[in-house]
Amino acid sequence: MTFFLPGRPHGKLDGSMAHFRSLRSARAYQRAKAVAFVEQVWELTFALEKRVQLPLVDLPGFAGGEVASGVDLPRDPTQAARALRAHWGLGVGPISHLVRHMEAHGIVVAFPKQDEDAVSVDAFSTSGLPRPIVVLTPNRFDDVYRHRFTAAHELGHLVLHGDAASGDMRQEREADAFAAEFLTPRESVLPELPTRTDFRRLAELRTTWGVSVDSLLYRCRELGLLSDSAASRAHQKLHSLREQPGFRNEPVTGYPGEQPVLLSSAFELATTETDLTAPALARELCWSVPRVRELIGLPDKRPTLRLVP
């Protein structure tokens, strides 16, 4: 009952300021649970920030926290992606460890467990709290390449739509355009893309650029290398190759650089430099200890029990 008493840190988020990856399939109660999850992520972040200095928020246009002075990104998605790459010093080549880059610039990234309520709503993000927060849910594909594109998509929302209410398909298309340019800049990837459907080459580029073959095919069509009909046939052929090497899904767990560590690292540092413990943090937040460990991302050390026949 202490959870409902006054005095505990509480993040209150207007659901209209959260950008949901799946606009049509998410139901109202699922969104409400997702918003509650984000609020708890912020409460945990706030508690840790009282003890540990997290990276300053370096996201041009972000309305809360620390704002990069004198930096204003274009509103066009493609130009904004190029400008943010330049601002973060990422060059024009492939981006490795995208999630780590986001965390290094002050964005809190959460990756809930499969059985967490938040996973029912694909990915989502918000600029409506003192730090930008992105939640990347382990969807049914569990593929690092889709995971990276989704992370870039949510980054696009933070950059382009931080001050706008969510809920329209135009914003989703703009976030997709931002993600495509951010991960595969036109001027760099165009000379490498095949001028006809070449799955062997696309599989190689998937590994090089860290994006799915689906995304590369879409890029080929978007940049005029494939016609609409050729791209459609290629997507149909790709469906039959899904289980072949170079095309099958690769679990996110195999890529540490694409898994968030900001909160767990902050907690580890706080336990080293202060007397903070998971039970103490749970008492401060009025949460259960398992919930604290779950949101931080700490492994559950309790033994697994089973009935003996």
Image (cartoon, helix red, strand yellow):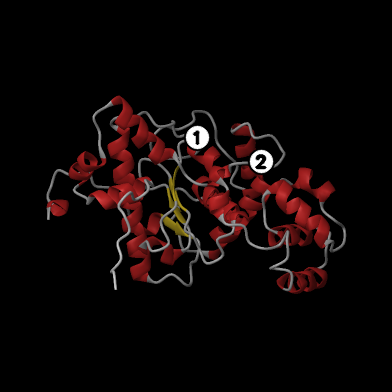
| Label total for image | 2
- What residue sits 62% from the left and 51% below the top? 179
Q: Is residue 18 visible?
A: yes
Q: Is residue 153 visible?
A: no
Q: Which residue is mark 2?
A: 82
Tag shown at residue 26: none
Image coords of residue 160 (percent x, y): 53, 48
**In this view, which residue lies farthest toward the right?**
195
Quarter-wise, where is residue 304 in the image? bottom left
Q: Is residue 198 left or right of residue 244?
A: right
- Label 2 SS: helix
Front-most of residues 258 and 154: 258
Q: On the rendered image, what quadrant is the C terminus found in? A: bottom left
Quarter-wise, where is residue 150 in the image? bottom right
Front-most of residues 147 and 296: 296
Image coords of residue 19 (percent x, y): 45, 57
In this view, the mark in front (1 or 2): 1
Image coords of residue 85 (percent x, y): 63, 38
Residue 83 against residue 220 in the figure, above or below: above
Density class for disc 2 (Cα within 10 Å; few <14, some 14-19, many ≥20) is many
Tag shown at residue 104: 1
- What residue sits 22% from the left and 50% below the top? 287
Do the CB atoms of the residues marked 1 and 2 lie less than 8 Å apart? no
Front-most of residues 40 and 255: 255
Residue 87 against residue 25 in the figure, above or below: above
Q: Amino acid at mark 1?
A: Ala
Residue 18 against residue 97 in the figure, above or below: below
**1 or 2: tag closer to the N-terminus:** 2
> Cα distance, mark 1 to mark 2?
19 Å
